[in-house]
Amino acid sequence: MNFKKLYYTFSNTIFFKKLSALYYQVGGRKPWSFGYWEARNMEIERLINDEKIISKFADDKELIKGYGKNFDERVIEYPWLISKIKNNDNYILDAGSILNFPFVINNHKLTGKRVMIANLNPEHYCFYKTSVSYVYSDYADIRHTCFKDNLFDVIVCSSVLEHVGMDNTYIYSDESKFNEKRTEDYLLVIDELHRLLKQGGRLLLTFPFGRYENLGWLQQFDINNVKKIIKRFGGKSNLYFYKYTKNGWTRSNEKESDECLYLHT
């Protein structure tokens, strides 16, 4: 009997996820402890299906007190992304695979959309039966993809840009080709994603912001990096800042966030 496969199958059951999430809740809600990921994903699913929450992100309103306390930035990124998807966004590129989870891809804002997911490595989840397509390996390197010009209405690139050109063996594999020290390559991504967007299309980017840090496997961007991105992309840009505090996540601004440090775990 393949116990590893058996455990993986069991860990993906609803029963296991709910039990793990409950353990996290009653165990003090310590980030990254047992049950954290299940509790976080269940919370994300709740948030992206709550129209009041989505409207706060859509209108850039202040979040409720205690929002997302003891959870990472995904509780900000997912509702923000979902709030920006429009009814006429028919062709969507997920550059880096943030949408490829059942609790996200089945959200009503994505129903009926043609979603293309580009990621360096294949993943466990596959939703090809629901108009989702996939491209992997070198074809999915978002510095130079295999797609034609002017293809997508909207491109989602969330918590990916900061890893481009860095040491991605931490994330993907121990292959040397994933270990790079090309800290300016994130600008090549901006060029490529601009090429792929239709006229009037939108690029939805999220990344860690604060004091510049090079952590090897990622870099945290500062305002100088942001200005480079905006200049490279051209067109109209809107900036949104969120910051984690002792009371949870809250709206912020450049000045309040520019000295934040990346959390090392």
Image (cartoon, helix red, strand yellow):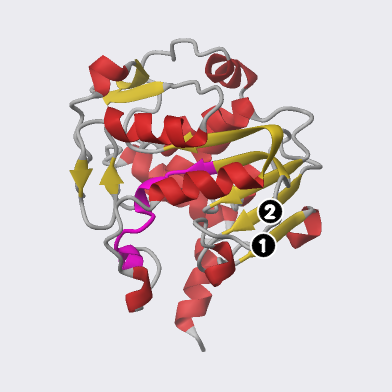
Q: In the rendered view, tell whether residue 185 sits above or below residue 212.
A: below
Quick one: label 2, few (<14), some, or many (20+) residues within 10 Å? many
Q: Position of residue 19 (x, y in %)?
A: 46, 50
- The kind of residue tagged 1 is Tyr
Residue assigned mark 2: 116
At x 59%, y 31%, the residue is 48
Magenta segment = 157-170
Q: Nearer the viewer, residue 54 or 25?
A: 54
3D distance between C-alphas at marks 2 and 1: 6 Å
Q: Position of residue 142 (x, y in %)?
A: 52, 56
Q: Position of residue 25 (x, y in %)?
A: 36, 38
Dot label at residue 84: none
Left-right relation of 176 to 47: left
Which of the two discs, 2 and 1, labels the residue nearer the N terminus? 2
At x 64%, y 63%, the residue is 146
Tell whether position 169 is magenta.
yes
Q: Is residue 46 visible?
A: no
Q: Are marks 2 and 1 in contact (CB under 8 Å)?
A: yes
* Element at label 2: strand
Left-right relation of 19 to 245: right
Q: In the rendered view, tell whether residue 87 sits above or below residue 255.
A: below
- The kind of residue tagged 2 is Met
Left-right relation of 160 to 215: right
Dot label at residue 134: 1
* Element at label 1: strand
Tell whether position 12 is magenta.
no
Q: Position of residue 244 (x, y in %)?
A: 29, 26
